[in-house]
Image (cartoon, rainbow, N blue to C red):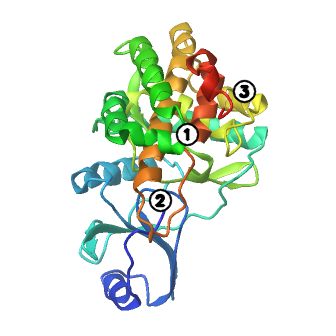
Amino acid sequence: MAVYTHVSAEALSRFLSRYNVGDLVSAKGIAEGVENSNYLVDTTRGRFILTLYEKRVAADDLPFFMALLDHLATKGLPVPPAIPDSEGQSIQQLEGRPACLIRFLPGVSLSHPTPSQALAAGDALGQMHHAFADFTLTRPNTMGIDTWRPLFDRCGRSLDQIAPGLHDTLDRALDHVVERWPYDTLDTCAIHADLFPDNVLMRGDQVSGLIDFYFACTDIRVLDLAVTHSAWSFDATGTHHDAAIGHALFAGYERHFPLSTAERDAFPTLAAGACLRFALSRAWDWLNTPADALVTRKDPLAYLRRLAHYAPDLLPDTMKHHA
């Protein structure tokens, strides 16, 4: 979540008048994340999230995301579907951006999850994949393996502004992972593809919300577990790996989907791929985030350090001080 597009109180009040949610009391921009513009909105009838979809989320993809959230909500998962207005429309326009008003879910996102909380998150991920068994819509992974090399090329030698030698290190790592990627050999389904701790709301050791599905797509099912593992089982800098967190995620997930031998064999490559995906997207954002955006830039080197855990041979000695 972030704020790129600023919304005036007058414009927001007009927007809310389409809904049966009461009058605007307050609105506060949410700085976490890097994808869309988000506001925490309080009205005389409750609390909501306003999301304006920025360039990385295509307007044509929004019906897929809305249908996916409705499907999961129908299955009883704690997700925040968009609220329809008085005419039944969920997708609006506000300040020149597609926009939705979304139900607020209680709970907190964690900076330092415990193994018990990781167990619950892994269990919720498995439940979500089960719920997708009869979800028939599909969407390509717009941040999938076929996009990494083009994104790397767009970053170009500017990567070395982030860390000397980063360009060549990522170049070699891309070749390594692409060569070993398990194309068409593992189960696929709809996946979240971005289940970081800040996209899981907790109340104690229980999951109270799964949020921010705007990278959801159809891809390798266990890739979702690899993304989650890389996000949860390291500290924010990527320096410290907590094996107990990783084991707990696996244990929760395998309540629903015990991993096959092929999935276990492919997991280090999938996790290394997850590290490259986030290192590259963070690098692009680091190099291109507008100076006046209310947004927290995220360190791409934190994922270089994670890559060193999953595939230590990929980093040359000259880069290991960064990892």
For disc 1, the marked residue is 163
Residue 156 against residue 52 in the figure, above or below: above
Looking at the picture, tell me which residue is in the foreground, 15 or 75: 15
Q: Which mark is residue 247?
A: 3
Instruction: First in sequence, mark 1 or 2: give its number.
Output: 2
Looking at the picture, tell me which residue is in the foreground, 314 or 3: 314
Q: Residue sitting at 75 percent across and 48 percent down? A: 112
Q: Quadrant of the C terminus?
A: top right
Q: What amino acid type is highlighted by mark number 1? A: Ala
In terms of secondary structure, where does tag 3 sit?
Answer: helix
Q: In this image, 216 relative to 165: left or right?
A: left
The crowding category of the residue bearing disc 1, from other C-alpha atoms within 10 Å (few below 14, some 14 to 19, many at least 20), is few
Residue 26 against residue 120 in the figure, above or below: below
Q: What amino acid type is highlighted by mark number 3? A: His
Count of numbered marks? 3
The crowding category of the residue bearing disc 2, from other C-alpha atoms within 10 Å (few below 14, some 14 to 19, many at least 20), is many
Q: Residue sitting at 40 percent across and 37 percent down? A: 157
